[in-house]
Image (cartoon, helix red, strand yellow):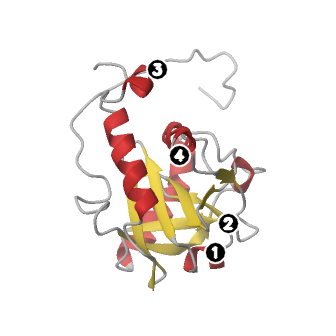
C-alpha cells in the first residue's frame, strides 16, 4: 500500500454490456444543448489530461453535473488559456468554411480512439481536418459542431450557451452515418477496427 506504483503489476479487465444512447436517442437528429463549464480542464502540469484515468474523470464529472443542474445536456471544458479542450467524455469538432477543426492534445484533449476514427473517415471523405485551437467565440459562429466518443458515437450539437448552431449539419450527418456503419463492421475498409465480442 502506498503511492509508489513502480512495483505494481498492470491488470486489465474488459467488460461488455448493452448501452443506450449516451446523450439521448435524439442526439443526432435534434442535437444536444451544451454549456461552457465554469470548471477548467486539468492542466498538463497537474495530471496529463490525455491519460484516460479515473482521476481525470472527477474533473469531467463536476462539469457534467454543473451542466445538467443548469438544464443542459452536456458541458464543454476550456483549458487555463480559455481555449476549447473537449466535452466531459467526448472530443469536439467544429465546422467552419468547409474545414473541420478539433482541439489538439496541447489544449488538453484526450487522444480518443473515436476521435482518430472520425478524423480518418472525414479525410477519406475528402474533408480537410485540422487539429487547431478553438476559442470559445468560435463555437458561437460555427456552421456545425459535433462531439464524438465511444459511448456518444457521433452526436450533433444544437446550441452552446443558448446560442443556436445549425443542427444537424450535412457533414455531421455524413460522418455519423459512416461511423455508425464502420463500428458495426458494415464497411469493409474499416472492418479491421472491429473485434467480435
Q: Mark 4 points at which residue?
A: 122
- The residue at the point 55 percent across, 58 percent down is 93
Q: Does the rendering let one see residue 65?
A: yes
Q: How far is the residue under mark 2 from the one under mark 1?
A: 6 Å
State the image coordinates of residue 116 (x, y, percent, origin top left).
Answer: 56, 39
Residue 144 drawn above or below residue 7: below
Q: Mark 1 points at which residue?
A: 138
State the image coordinates of residue 13 (x, y, percent, origin top left).
Answer: 40, 21
Choose mark 3 or mark 2, whichever is in front: 2
- Tag 2–tag 1 contact (CB < 8 Å): yes
- Tag 4–tag 1 contact (CB < 8 Å): no
Q: Name the residue under label 2.
A: 134
> In front: 97, or 19?
97
Q: How far is the residue under mark 3 from the one under mark 2?
A: 35 Å
Q: How far is the residue under mark 4 from the one under mark 1?
A: 20 Å
- The residue at the point 49 percent across, 81 percent down is 161
**The C terminus, quarter of image:** top left
- The residue at the point 35 percent across, 33 percent down is 183
Q: How far is the residue under mark 3 from the one under mark 1?
A: 39 Å
Q: Name the residue under label 3.
A: 12
Quadrant position of residue 30: bottom left
Quadrant position of residue 59: bottom right
Choose mark 4 or mark 1, whichever is in front: 4
Amino acid at each position: 500500500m502506498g503511492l509508489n506504483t513502480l512495483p505494481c503489476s498492470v491488470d486489465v479487465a474488459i467488460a461488455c454490456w448493452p448501452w443506450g444512447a449516451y446523450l439521448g436517442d435524439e442526439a443526432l437528429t435534434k442535437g444536444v444543448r451544451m454549456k461552457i463549464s465554469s470548471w477548467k480542464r486539468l492542466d498538463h502540469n497537474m495530471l496529463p489530461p490525455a491519460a484516460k484515468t479515473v482521476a481525470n474523470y472527477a474533473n469531467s464529472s463536476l462539469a457534467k453535473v454543473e451542466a445538467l443542474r443548469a438544464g443542459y445536456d452536456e458541458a464543454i471544458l476550456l483549458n487555463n488559456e480559455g481555449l476549447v479542450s473537449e466535452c466531459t467524455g467526448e472530443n469536439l469538432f467544429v465546422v467552419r468554411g468547409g474545414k473541420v477543426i478539433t482541439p489538439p492534445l496541447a489544449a488538453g484533449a484526450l487522444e480518443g480512439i473515436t476521435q482518430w476514427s472520425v478524423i480518418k473517415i472525414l479525410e477519406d471523405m475528402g474533408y480537410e481536418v485540422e487539429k487547431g485551437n478553438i476559442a470559445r467565440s468560435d463555437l458561437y459562429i460555427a456552421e456545425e459542431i459535433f462531439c464524438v466518443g465511444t459511448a456518444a458515437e457521433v452526436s450533433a450539437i444544437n446550441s452552446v450557451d443558448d446560442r443556436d448552431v445549425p443542427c444537424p449539419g450535412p457533414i455531421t450527418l455524413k460522418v455519423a452515418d459512416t461511423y455508425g456503419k464502420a463500428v458495426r463492421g458494415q464497411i469493409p475498409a474499416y472492418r479491421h477496427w472491429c473485434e467480435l465480442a
